[in-house]
Image (cartoon, coloured by chain):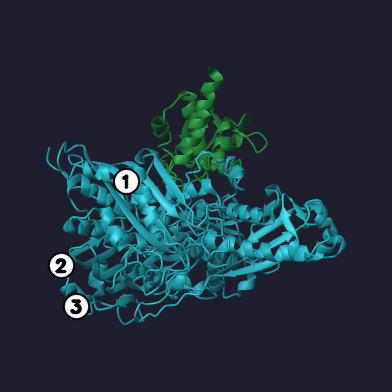
Amino acid sequence: MTTGKRESAYRNDAVIKVTGRARYADDHTFPRMAHCVPVYSDFVHAENLSVDTREAARQDGVLKVITAADIPGAVRFGQIERDYPMLAEDRILSHGDVVALVVAETREAALEAARQVRISADPLPPLIDPEEAFRPDAPVIRPGTKNNIVNHHKIRRGDARSALAACDIVIDHTFRTSFVEHAYLEPESAVCVPRPDGVMEVYGSMQHPFTTRRFVAAILGEPLARVEIRTVPVGGGFGGKDDTAAVVCARAALAARLCDRPVKLTYARQWSMRESYKRHPYVLHYRMGLNRDGRVQAVEARIIADAGAYCSTTPWVTWRSAVQCCGPYRVEHVHADVYGVATNNVFTGAFRGFGSPQVNFAVEQLMDMAAEKTGLSPLEIRRINMVTQGAETITGQLLNNHTVSIREVMDTVAEKIGYEEKRARSSRGKGDPENLYGVGLAICYRGASLGAEGMDFCSAVINCQFDGSILLEVGIHENGQGAESAMILTLQEHLGVDRGRITYRQPSTSSIPDGGPTVASRGTLMGCGAVVLAAKKLKKIIAEALADTLGCAPEKVRFQDDAILGEADDQRLSWDEAMRQLFLKRVYPYSFAGFRAPAVTWDEETGQGDAYFTYVYSCQAVEVSVNLKTGRVRLLNVVAAHDIGKAVNRPMLLGQIYGGIAQGMGMALMEKVETEGGVIRNASFRKYRIPKAMDLPEMTALIIENPDPTSPSGAKGIGEPALEIIAPAIANAVYHATGRRMDRLPIRIEKEDA
Amino acid sequence: MEEAELGNEIVEISMQVNGVSVVLRTPANRTLLSILREDLRLTGAKEGCGIGECGACTVLMNGKAVNACMVLAPKADGARITTIEGLGDEARLHPLQEAFVKHGAVQCGFCTPGMILSAKALLDENPNPTRLEIREGISGNLCRCTGYQQIVDAIEEVAARKQGEES
């Protein structure tokens, strides 16, 4: 275990970012570039939509006003269900629906003309309460569907009902979470350029170029090969720049195609907050049964997630919630139902954590509640129930292909923060009401990568040049997390070359195969996996070509110290010389390899199967002070430990942990997208507050490394584990401070009269 | 994006931008941010919110950190402006830029130019801040990626180095 404080950070893009030279989507301009803006309606739910664009089209500088009727390809698209109207047709299902696009010579002219678009429709009552929408007699929101249930995932294991009836203790509790905004600092932006060869070229702020390509190709009605999505720096994503960002690119491409000019569509913050999908609010009803000895016997859970008006990734988000609905614990009897339910709220989708922060918020508080009821310490009850090496998860998966380190991880954090001693002196509501003190902790495991959500594979290209320089390209996207740097470091290690030789060639969707989305904390795992396999192939090519020169068998050739060596150290070719020799032999030092994730299985009816091919283990603990007079909760200290397999780039890994904690702290204590009748009331950074430097304490991040055999590089992922347990850790700490259980997010302390 | 009260009558303004004299005619209701980004092609300052809340557009105006999205053109007349492009370049990084690189204080990088300029304004005013004062000093700059810790580390190191040089 290491903290790695002193190591100097490596990022291939750090210098261009600190000097302001990095060119994000909106920093691009092209000759004859026009500007596009979206037009919204005032409706939340309406039918018989009619959009009159004539007046707007007559305004100075306006090139075109576009509605759904102008779309040459598909109006509706989506990653799972094709239900999202990229421009509204006859219905409005949410306040974020875009009804038209105005394209003009300048942004100002486009904004001016957008006010002249006349919109009429027959309003319908909005359905905004997911529990109401769930009822069989609820009006059906989405045309063509039978009810408002978007999906239903089940876990059926043992006989939970009978087991609960036989338990000594049953804890019955309901938890609620809120809409949360991603608040990436860079709003969505796209610049689309129709090329002379007919290809639509896209420079956009997005997390996933290949998803974006599908959206763009769909709206244009053109094949994938005629759309090229270029890589540009992205100003944050956190799951939020998947379909929302893809739709913005699709709209800009539509405008560019129809006007036959480059078009820029950059979102204002208030549009971004109005329209982009949020984290799902959950209602979680749990019944957890245990015996007096602290062993959890059974869990019944009924979980409803507000999907908002469109499907997006709700079925995948809620699937993870189902798989992880009992935390990292062994439970023999589980009966869980997780529903995504459509409403007329802003839609919800991927957000760092992806369905786990909500269930962890419930489960990790339930464990503390169970500890209290059984008289065990929160650490002890977790030790009794947590998964161990070879244990079976609630989905029937045997954890036997990697190191199950949850105990090591938890004990490391507990010791570092001094958990037991600090728990003993927590206030429990006694003492100075303006300065109550508490410590709290939470643990989890997280299934790595996509699991049974989807096809999981990724590729890398290593293209060595004959002058000794090397081009590397991987089907994983740089979202700001440092993906490219991790790939470079992995290649450097596996080829044994100087890092300065390697240039990361930012791929486009036309230069490398679809590597899947850069989501699910899979970038390092899948991307570095592909790099390792491609490096292996490359070394074989080079070894076979140079074995004679080096006087040894190909399998004896070694790659180290920026050179290629035979069996003896004096049989040595510098990397430069080796490349020259390959040129003379007319051998390409080039390799391509794909990494296919190990197989997973899933049975949708029983909710049983090997859901993920490996897991990341995490623990976070916090100290808080609570002021009952002001209601303020202050975070005093955070200690986090994560077993991520192997640290590829330590300072970046630490940065992911700190950043995840900060976002999770926002969700826990500050952030809530306030809606009223389906309309977001705080769609600005003035009203929606995210953590500032002053809101956060100094944090300690501990890295635990048990290289994972399922990962070619040994590394797993950190993006999401870093965020997903801070809220329950804070809630548990607030309980230890106040004696009050916090079952809602964000946490609000009822003020006591002075 | 909020509409300014000033009209769109054309004004002439002159500024020193990164040491270079600039004279331009522009509608009075345009922001310094849009002039920098669109007219001068200095795109290091970013628009994150348009209402002066996120600090991504921070530049130095007469040595003070300001949100360029809140400064209308006439206000910048006669001012000395430093943008991130004027602080240092690849060949010669400013110590703050160097420290941000070294400490891994950069992730998506969208807040970075503004963050570095706020840090510079802070250190110019208070060369020896505590970590808490650093946190206070950058509280006008939002970062959604880093949790600020490595940013504070970076600024602290530059402050300490400055102290070392002076003593």
Residue A366 is left or right of residue A265, and the answer is: left
Q: Which chain is cyan?
A: A
Q: Mark number for residue A168? A: 2
The first of marks 1 and 3 along the sequence is 3
Q: Which chain carries label 3?
A: A
Report helix, strand or loop for mark 2.
loop
Among the 4 quarters of the image, the one containing residue A321: bottom left
Q: Position of residue A648 (x, y in %)?
A: 56, 53
Query: Which residue is label 3 attached to?
Result: A162
Query: Which residue is label 1 attached to?
Result: A622
Q: Nearer the viewer, residue B110 or A583?
A: A583
**Crowd class of label 3 (few under 14; some 14 to 19; many from 20; radius 10 Å):** few
Q: Where is residue A366 in the image (x, y as percent from the top left)?
A: 24, 60
**Residue at 36% from the left image edge and 51% from the top image edge:** A411
Total marks shown come to 3
**Residue at 29% from the left image edge and 46% from the top image edge:** A419
Residue B128 against residue A157 in the figure, above or below: above
- The CA distance from mark 2 to mark 1 is 31 Å
Q: Which amino acid does label 2 sit on?
A: Asp
Q: Which amino acid does label 1 sit on?
A: Val
Q: Chain B is drawn in which colour?
A: green
